[in-house]
Amino acid sequence: MYIIKVKGKAKIPDYIQLRDSNFVLIAYFRADRPLKNLDRYGLEGKEDALAAVIASLDFGKLQKLEI
């Protein structure tokens, strides 16, 4: 799974994209909102680790998600 942080402009907020191994979009959510429904993506119980990864991400840089 891969993760990328997308910079918003003006009234559009920053977003996080989760992509599978084929780079197909599987999740798209606001970076400033609490993480919900992570069980859909196999990330249940990893909310704190994912929040730390999101905080350290650079905008526009695709990164392999390893948590």
Image (cartoon, helix red, strand yellow):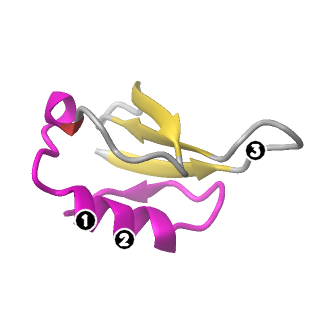
- Which residue lies at the image location 23% right of the left edge and 56% below the top edge? 47
Q: Is mark 3 on a helix, strand or loop?
A: loop
The answer to whether residue 14 is magenta is no
For label 3, the residue is 8
- Which residue lies at the image location 36% right of the left edge and 62% below the top edge? 51
For label 2, the residue is 52
- The answer to which quarter of the image holds residue 66 is bottom left
Q: Are marks 2 and 1 in contact (CB under 8 Å)?
A: yes
Task: Decide which of 43, 26 is in the foreground and name it.
Answer: 43
Label 2 packing within 10 angstroms: few (<14), some (14-19), many (20+): few
Q: Are marks 1 and 3 in contact (CB under 8 Å)?
A: no
Amino acid on which the number 3 mark rests in the picture: Gly
- The answer to which quarter of the image holds residue 44 is top left
Q: Where is residue 61 in the image (x, y as percent from the top left)?
A: 58, 59
Amino acid on which the number 1 mark rests in the picture: Asp
What is the spatial separation of the Cα atoms under label 1 and label 3, in whole angstroms?
23 Å
Region rendered in magenta: 39-67
Q: Where is residue 6 in the image (x, y as percent from the top left)?
A: 64, 47
Please report whichever mark, 1 or 3, sits nearer to the chain's N-terminal start. 3
Q: Where is residue 7 in the image (x, y as percent from the top left)?
A: 72, 50
For label 1, the residue is 48
Amino acid on which the number 2 mark rests in the picture: Ala
